[in-house]
Amino acid sequence: MRMHISMTVGVDDLKDALEEEGIRADLIVLGGDDSGSAPHSGQDDTTIDEFAGVFKLSKSRVLKTVTFVESSSASSSSSSNKKEPNQEASGSAFIMPLLVVLRGSDRVNLPALEERLGRKLRLAKASEVREITGCKIGRVSPFGVAGALVVIDEGIGDGDVILPAGSQSAHCVYLKIGFKDLFRLVSRFSPEVLPLGFRVSETAPKQ
């Protein structure tokens, strides 16, 4: 059975949570349209470059959330007509989605992630990302995606970071927050968060 998952955390929810948790952070609202879809390379370098330019930060301080899904194989096969038990005719075979939050300058080390979790994973397609998170690729937030497991990569390190935190009407919302406070805030909205000390990233090769 396919899971339909939607974003339930709004700007007011984030503001309330920050106040109640005593977390000092900045919510930044920028104009922009969250409709449509972006090319999915798994890196979203163009989007990260945009963010880094707007906030005048290096890509290592701008975070991205990459969506993975669990499948019966590492990648879906179009050559087989046989459907898996949890696969619909559309070809989707995900059960528990996985959101990995990491630095914009890094990429996910998929073999290490699969070994640690004991699961076979693949990058979610653009349509699956939209269905799971309610956002297009490059605008995904780790806050409040019901039924998803969230991994916050230890490679992010200390210091303030900026990441997409949802949308409000036609505006994009970003959050500037410290790394440890980020873990606390994500944990408040997403009970399935792996503890600190979990690293699954590697430095992306320079183009």
Image (cartoon, rainbow, N blue to C red):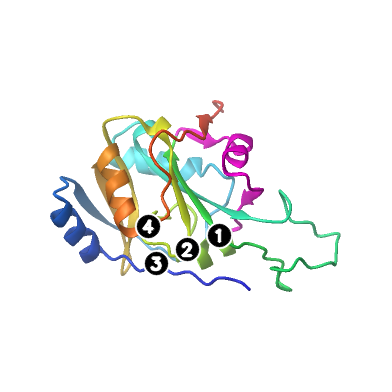
Give the extent of the magenta segment. 105-125
Mark identifier at residue 147: 2
Q: Which residue is mark 1?
A: 96
Lateral position of residue 72 relative to residue 55, left or right: right
- Pointer 1: residues within 10 angstroms few (<14), some, or many (20+)? some
Whether residues under marks 1 and 4 lie with C-beta atoms below 8 angstroms apart, the answer is: no
Lateral position of residue 127 relative to residue 45, left or right: right
Mark identifier at residue 7: 3
Looking at this view, is 13 or 85 the one in front? 85
Dot 4 or dot 3, earlier in sequence:
3
> Between marks 4 and 3, how big is the CA–CA gap?
11 Å
> Between marks 2 and 4, how big is the CA–CA gap?
8 Å
25 part of magenta stretch: no
Looking at this view, is 79 or 192 the one in front? 192
Q: Residue at x 62, y 41 (%)?
A: 114
Whether residues under marks 1 and 3 lie with C-beta atoms below 8 angstroms apart, the answer is: no
- Tally of marks: 4
Q: Which residue is mark 4?
A: 190
Amino acid found under the numbered disc labelled 4: Ser
Dot 1 or dot 3, earlier in sequence:
3
Whether residues under marks 2 and 4 lie with C-beta atoms below 8 angstroms apart, the answer is: no
Whether residues under marks 4 and 3 lie with C-beta atoms below 8 angstroms apart, the answer is: no
Whether residues under marks 2 and 1 lie with C-beta atoms below 8 angstroms apart, the answer is: yes
